[in-house]
Amino acid sequence: MENNGDLDLNCHATGDVRLDKAIYQWITWDKNPQTRAQIEALLLDGQVEELRRRLCSRMAFGTAGLRAAMGAGFALINDLTIIQSTQYYSSKEIMFSFLFHRLARLTAAVMLCKDIPVFLFSTYVPTPFVPYAVKRLGAAAGVMVTASHNPKEDNGYKVYWHNGAQISSPNDKEILKCIEESSEPWSESWNESLADNSPLRSDPLREISKMYMEDLSSVCFHRELNTKSPLKFVHSSFHGVGHDYVQQAFRAFGFPPPIPVPEQKDPDPNFSTVSCPNPEEGESVLELSLRLAERENATIVMATDPDADRLAVAEQSDRCRWKVFTGNELAALLGWWMLFNWKETHPDPADRERMYMLATTVSSKILKAFARKEGFHFEETLPGFKWIGKKIHELAKRGMNMVPDKDGVSAAVVVAEMASYLYNKNLTLHQQLENIFETYGYHISTTSYVICYDPPTVKRIFTRLRNFEGENTYPRSSGGHSIVDVRDVTTGYDSSQPDKLCVLPMTKSSQMITFTLQNGIVATLRTSGTEPKIKFYTEFCAPPGKSDISSLEEELKKVTDTLVEEFLEPDKNNLIRRSI
């Protein structure tokens, strides 16, 4: 083995032909001295297993694109793997919209060196701006480089198709196939200065910001009331990019800007004030926001995650007591709010025939209950917002949806308007949530996870569930309740269908099984597409009129605890339980 560097690879061959080839390729292709040195150091130290882990596998597209820790190797996020992931698009001669700093500039360089026009934002923007820009600018695709709400050691590479939705099958598999077939980077792909000097590069920041805020006004229904609202709001951007854009969105709706959490206002890749940069983890990670709200006498706290595509909301019920809404509870409130305002402007019930609400199969069934009672359409998709974005594109070529991806910026200001309207009616968000449940039935849910760093263990857990009481037999009960239906999206099996075939697309690359119990509880176990987690979701869907919440919650907890212990066996499998 030879290479054009200083390291003599012949003296350090591992004897594994596949690994030696990967080492040679890495040291030959990688122009970043830091990551190249990481591989050289591992080779000199004889760290064969670590080299094999880093170099003999490649990242795959999960529910949110490519996601991995940063570091050297084809299995991690770094300059070389970002360039390789981008060269596919240059072979297709299509135009991109990009975002982020060094990695985004390298991504842009791949395009520009092949004379392909590039829109490169000049500063950090929220993830939702990228799919929005793809659609508004007519770009062929878009890329967002972000760690999102993941640990600071991680990074990610989200890819959006021309329809503004994240890529899904079969496009994701075609991209990975092309990366494998053409993995050597072009020399000009490393020319980061092209992002500054090329006449084919343009900055869409001002244009996109202006259009986004103007379009956002289409979901502003009570501007005059907003301008007079006595409510005060606190917003944390969780050391991410959301601050400036949430401030602008509030102004667009007629509100004064929310009070920022100063310690978390500006981008900080170390997430220095939070143990976990995901605001959906609950009250423990909202500590700074809640204490500031109490000092400022603010009623509502909002937190966007670092790339501003997720939103958490808390409401002060009385002095120093807070109701932190779950994602499913926010879905119920936002779904009701959109339906309420739709009905105000569309009094003819026939108009509901062209109205749709969408949710993933692991989300609450409350929107389905809305649709059943109100007479509009509801459709379910696989987990991952890319599937909702794809469904939006299928259902309508135009319409109210500006961004076919999660959007914490627009959600924040819509929640503010809803809270302001309800306050004017002497109602809180929590009280309105209770009204919704009384009308459409209580939907009590639990969402959590266990951590497993060993893929064979994960596979063994789900194989056991598929052969629980003999070959090809699933569990028949949980928590003392019969399981009446099983849907296994991994294998394409659904016992509730006449032909036993799953209506949702089969996804062999991930694990997901849903159990429907006789008492109305629906439970789903699935692997995360971006993290080493097995997630579990349980929900008690009660009919309208059944309002003994404490008994519903008690029953749901009992079934959830039993399901986790019996089906996942955390202690036996050395699973790490959620600590927050």
Image (spheres, rainbow, N blue to C red):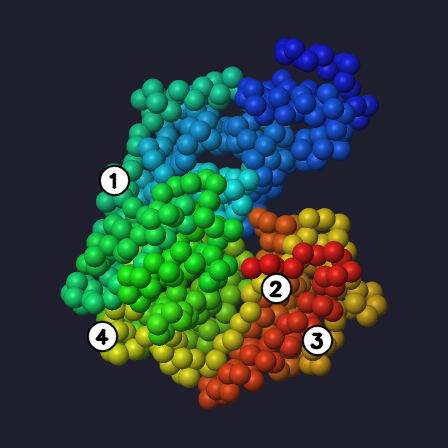
Instruction: Please state which amino acid type lies under the numbered disc 2.
Output: Phe
Identify the image quadrant of the C terminus: bottom right
- Please name which of the two marks, 1 or 4, marks the residue nearer to the observer: 4
Q: Mark 4 points at which residue?
A: 424
Q: Return the disc, 3 or 2, that comes first in the chain's sequence.
A: 3
Q: Is residue 496 above or below residue 10?
A: below
- Please name which of the two marks, 4 or 3, marks the residue nearer to the observer: 4
Identify the image quadrant of the N terminus: top right
Among all residues in the image, which is located at the extreme front?
295
Q: Name the residue under label 3.
A: 478
The residue that appears at 63% across and 35% down in the rendered structure is 75
Give percent across and percent down for residue 320: 38, 69
Is residue 24 rendered to the left or right of residue 545? Answer: right
- Is the Cβ of the residue at disc 1 closer than 8 Å to that at disc 4? no
Q: Name the residue under label 1.
A: 207
Q: Return the disc, 4 or 3, that comes first in the chain's sequence.
A: 4
Q: Distance between the residues labelled 3 and 1?
A: 55 Å
Give percent across and percent down for residue 328: 47, 67
Q: Name the residue under label 2.
A: 536
